């Protein structure tokens, strides 16, 4: 199914879900049952077929009959095995640092209170991860046959970012997915969406291994998007219901504050915190601070930097899409009847309130693990940066006109990598203006420099770079498409992309 076709399907189903919620839920239930019936029906037909042929072969001792039976078994057996594998496919268990009741009694007390109040299933495992996120995961021990174990996943940065009241709202939201608030059938569908996703991936990975697997994968290619679209819309409805649960348990103000705080913080951490941390590798061979230990105070100290009216205004403009079951920030906050308000400062984070000194110990664990994975890359980049700095200085001491093509291209690419595309513009312009052979990377980066200045002529350079080097087509297409979407509209971007694709058609 084409991307645009899938988007239209989702938006149409969302309209039906809003206008006729009861009928829509019945439709999703029927589609989910159909998925099971196809798998079980196929398995049953194969087994009955083999048994029927066995009975015939047993009564007819002729060589042709026995040969036909053996051939049928050889054809049917891979289908039976694949179906059984799909039914018992193992769902990956979440990873993280598991907490015990003795380590975090206050956290487990809160969880027990929520379970009792919501009449929900128990949480079997509580994991702390290094992500700015919280989630609930259900992992079946027997594939589609269930035996679910419930995992509550709390990111340590998430716990440092929120107050105790806000984390209560978050956990109540996650627990809402396990409670009776969605209805037992909706809850079952909610789980099977994840399970079916794993089964679909399982089949896709094996589609080239045999003809039978290829047929299975092709059938799932047809059914998968329709199943995913229907369950996507229901899952989005469940997010709203889980938000309502959180608002009822912890208060709408705390729920909205948590939603807004995490949305603003996630953008800031991606755009500022982590880039600034890694930028230290230019000057230092080891970080001046370790990320997870620093977050405890840094997330509060920098609130004036990330919790601003301008950032909130930008976040409020983001619209929901058809690939994330979580609605956009403005829709979620508006749904619980709360305004677009900046989050306030709190004295004690959820990490300190719920975990105490254990949070500091876990932060050190995460820091050690992070540095073990980053140390080699960090120090290699540090050495490369210092060598590049010396080489750039050497080349910049000479007038551009005195640099041959090789040196000019080296200078341009070093400036792009270690400074910016804009810093390399004059060298790129000189290089592309020289007579003789044109080189794809300088052409590509000059096009980017022009686009950064708002000059549409940069698109022509992206097209030329693609002609010179088809392997750069993906980069050229991405940069041009994003620029046109921002400067004009999606239709203009699609038209340009279609023209670009004709270059090597």
Image (tube, rainbow, N blue to C red):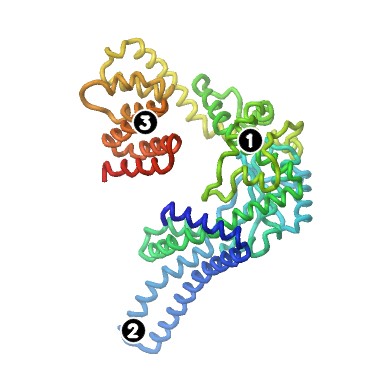
Q: Which residue does the image show at 41% across and 37% down from the upper left?
A: 484
The numbered disc on residue 456 is 3
Identified at 76% across, 31% down, the residue is 347
Image location of residue 452, percent across then percent down: 42, 27
Residue indicated by mark 2: 65
Query: Observer-nearest residue: 37 or 501?
Result: 501
Against 17, residue 405 (above or below) is above
Q: Secondary structure at mark 2?
A: helix
Label 3 neighbour load within 10 Å: few <14, some 14-19, many 20+ = some
Q: Residue at x 65, y 34 (%)?
A: 363
Q: Nearer the viewer, residue 461 or 131?
A: 461
| Side of 465 where 4 appears, left or right | right
Residue appearing at x 29%, y 39% in the figure: 470
Q: CA distance from mark 1 to mark 2?
A: 66 Å
User: Residue 196's x, y, as percent?
Assistant: 53, 60
Q: Earlier in the sequence, mark 1 or mark 2?
A: 2
Answer above or below: position of 420 versus 106. above
The alpha-carbon separation of the residues under discs 1 and 3 comes to 49 Å
* Label 1 SS: helix
Q: Could you tell me if the residues under marks 2 and 3 are in contact, i.e. CB atoms within 8 Å?
A: no
């Amino acid at each position: 199914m084409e991307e645009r076709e899938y988007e239209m399907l989702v938006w149409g189903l969302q309209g039906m879900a809003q206008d006729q919620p009861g009928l829509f839920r019945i439709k999703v239930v029927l589609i989910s049952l159909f998925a099971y019936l196809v798998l079980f029906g196929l398995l049953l037909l194969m087994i009955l077929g083999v048994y029927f042929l066995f009975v015939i072969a047993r009564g007819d001792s002729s060589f042709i009959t026995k040969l036909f039976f053996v051939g049928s078994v050889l054809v049917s057996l891979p289908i039976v095995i694949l179906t059984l594998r799909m039914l018992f496919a193992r769902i990956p268990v979440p990873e993280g640092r598991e907490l015990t009741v003795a380590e975090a009694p206050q956290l487990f007390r809160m969880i027990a209170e929520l379970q009792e109040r919501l009449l929900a299933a128990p949480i079997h495992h509580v994991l702390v991860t290094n992500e700015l996120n919280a989630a609930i995961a259900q992992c079946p021990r027997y594939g589609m046959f269930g035996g679910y174990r419930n995992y509550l996943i709390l990111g340590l940065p998430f716990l440092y970012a929120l107050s105790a009241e806000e984390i209560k709202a978050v956990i109540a939201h996650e627990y809402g997915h396990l409670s009776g608030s969605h209805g037992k059938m909706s809850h079952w569908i909610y789980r099977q969406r994840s399970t079916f996703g794993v089964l679909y991936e399982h089949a896709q990975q094996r589609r080239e291994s045999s003809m039978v697997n290829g047929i299975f994968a092709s059938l799932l290619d047809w059914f998968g998007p329709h199943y995913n679209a229907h369950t996507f819309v229901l899952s989005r409805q469940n997010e709203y219901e889980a938000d309502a649960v959180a608002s009822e348990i912890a208060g709408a103000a705390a729920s909205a504050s948590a939603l807004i705080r995490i949305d603003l913080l996630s953008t800031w951490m991606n755009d500022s915190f982590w880039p600034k941390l890694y930028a230290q590798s230019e000057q230092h061979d080891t970080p001046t601070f370790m990320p997870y230990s620093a977050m405890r105070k840094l997330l509060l100290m920098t609130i004036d930097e990330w919790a601003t009216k301008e950032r909130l205004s930008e976040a409020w403009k983001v619209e929901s899409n058809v690939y994330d079951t979580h609605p956009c920030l403005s829709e979620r906050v508006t749904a619980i009847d709360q305004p677009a308000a900046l989050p306030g400062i709190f004295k004690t984070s959820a990490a300190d309130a719920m975990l105490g000194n254990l949070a500091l110990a876990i932060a050190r664990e995460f820091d050690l693990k992070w540095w073990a994975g980053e140390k080699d890359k960090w120090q290699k980049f540090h050495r490369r940066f210092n060598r590049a700095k010396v080489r750039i200085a050497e080349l910049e001491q000479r007038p551009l006109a005195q640099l041959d093509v090789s040196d000019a291209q080296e200078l341009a690419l070093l400036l792009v990598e270690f400074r910016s595309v804009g810093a390399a513009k004059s060298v790129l312009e000189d290089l592309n203006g020289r007579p003789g052979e044109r080189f794809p990377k300088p052409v590509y980066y000059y096009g980017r420099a022009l686009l950064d200045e708002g000059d549409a002529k940069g698109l022509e350079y992206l097209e030329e770079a693609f002609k010179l080097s088809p392997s750069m087509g993906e980069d050229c297409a991405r940069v041009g498409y994003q620029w046109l979407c921002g400067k004009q509209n999606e239709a203009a971007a699609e038209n340009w992309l279609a023209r670009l694709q004709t270059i090597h058609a």
